[in-house]
Image (cartoon, grey):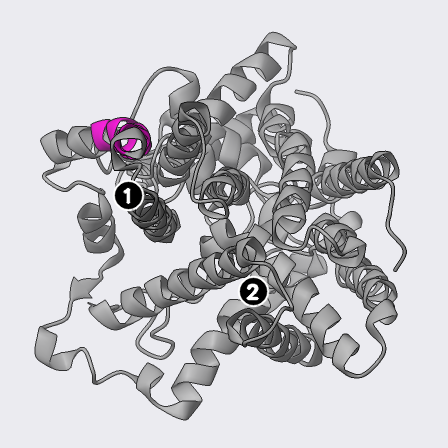
Amino acid sequence: MAPLPRRRERILVGALCAVAAIRVLVFSAAFPLFDNVDEKSHFDVVYRYSRGDLPRGLEPKSAGAVRIIRYCETWEYLSAPEKYEEGRTPPPGWTVGPEVLRIALDRAVADEARVTNAESTQPPLYYLVAGAWYRLGQLLGLRQGFGAYWIRFLNVPLVALIVWVVHLVARALAPGEAAIRLGAPLLAAFLPQDAFFSIGNDVLSPLTAGLAFFALLSIGARATGGMGIHALAGLAVSASLLTKLTNLPILAIAAAVAAIELIAARRRGELPAVWPRVVLLASTIALPAGAWALRNYVLMGDFTGMAQKAARLGWTPKPAAELLHHPIFTPAGSWQFLGFVLASFWRGEFTWHGTPLAWGGVDLFYAASSLLLVGVAAAAAFARGPAESCGERFGIRAGLGLVVLSILLLAWGSIAYDFGRCRYPSTEFPYIASGRLIGGAMAPFLCLYAIGLKRLLSRLGAGRAALPLLILLALAMVSMEVVLSLDVFGSRFNWFHMVAP
């Protein structure tokens, strides 16, 4: 592919950001509020933060949040219409008489008062941002369901920024290949990950971790950098940890970058000049995230809050002797785990009428192509030869490390607990396998996918076909997304049919 002028490239990526924003806006409005993936719980935490009421542990949902949830929620995600009289789900709250609605809301508040919110110990960054955004919506007069949809619409600018961050990472990993610099953000713009249409911290994770990864690449590729980039990298890593606990693998990348920088400085005899930068990197990571961890320990006796959440969900830690007695150590079990992680990383976990919004053949393609193409990219990075510069090799290896460590973190969580009567994970499916949980690895993953495709096609003498094939994949993804969601657009509960209170 001929070199692409930098200005035209920026325009094309900007257009992809705009397309991604429009797509997320439309689908966020089409899906009814409070989906099957913990959106009720995340909304409650946003609601609390918007009022300056930071949870001090596991607490029941606030009465105000419960009333909004009950007013807007639908049963369409989990139940087929045939289960109800006349083949229709119960009507939306805005179509019910005031006395009937009052009784229903009071009953919902009483029921929820007996149950704690398992998400109330989550790290704070997303909820602080979304809470402030929610307050802005209230100042604009957005109430009830329109206010909750307003929180969802925060995802519109966030996803546009994610596309741009993926482009930045692609430029760092493959600076001389326009097919990758455009192909990776193209995949990000059309990624059918339905967490982008929901309220939850999964949508902020790819942005904060992607920025952290890019900043660390800027240091590690050259094994040098000024105080400013070290401070920015440290703050971005800390922001990743304060967004989602499953972003912990970014710490390993930061440690590797610091080690490489110190080793290179020692060889050059510049250790006294480099030490302050590394200390600054470590300090800007440790101070914000450490303050939150200390708060958790004081209030809950646990640095992460995970112990309380696990107990709330009915998870119990396994004895060390039982850790290896897990199906993940069998070929069938490892494929079941890895296949679900990779498929759900691409398309999410929404159900409609109790059926996943997914096709088995497409899931197989997502999982198999991910393993193949990321594997090709990894092989190229570790093979001898002049295929990439030292900086590119470091970036690809770091990206691969982040992806692998993120998946291994989910595997460890799957092994470490007995899930008891929990519905997911469960004794029948004992895997924490939700791809959205490792969204922090999205930027390097999509770049590795595009790099692997380009390398594979180049070996076959068809390297120029990489970008056209990625365009076809993007069009196929959005087409399948539309087809799978056709019934959703007709829901009486979505934004298009909502009536102001």
Q: Is residue 470 above or below residue 323?
A: above
Judging by the rendered image, the residue that carries numbered circle 1 is: 115
Cα distance between the residues tagged 2 and 1: 28 Å
Q: Nearer the viewer, residue 477 or 384?
A: 384
Residue lying furthest bottom = 331
Question: x, y (%) of residue 218?
Answer: 51, 40
Q: Is residue 217 above or below residue 51?
A: below
Q: Reading the chain from its start, which is encountered first: label 2 or label 1?
A: 1
**Image point (87%, 47%), residue name:** 4
Residue type indicated by callout 2: Ser
**Image point (22%, 62%), residue name:** 315
Question: x, y (%) of residue 267?
Answer: 32, 49
Q: Nearer the viewer, residue 475 or 100?
A: 475
Residue type indicated by callout 1: Val
Q: Is residue 103 above or below residue 478?
A: above
Closer to viewer: mark 2 or mark 1: 2
Is label 2 in contact with label 1 (beta carbons under 8 Å)?
Answer: no
Residue 28 covered by magenta stretch: no
Residue 277 covered by magenta stretch: yes
Category of crowding for the residue at label 2, using alpha-carbon neighbours closer than 10 angstroms: few (below 14), some (14–19), many (at least 20): many
Q: Quadrant of the N terminus?
A: bottom right
Q: Is residue 313 left or right of residue 459?
A: left
Q: Quadrant of the C terminus?
A: top right
Judging by the rendered image, the residue that carries numbered circle 2 is: 344
SS of the residue under disc 2? helix
**Image point (43%, 34%), residue name:** 233
Question: x, y (%) of residue 500?
Answer: 70, 21
Label placed on residue 21: none
Q: Give the residues drawn in magenta, as a range.
A: 275-291
Q: Nearer the viewer, residue 40 or 394?
A: 394
SS of the residue under disc 1? loop
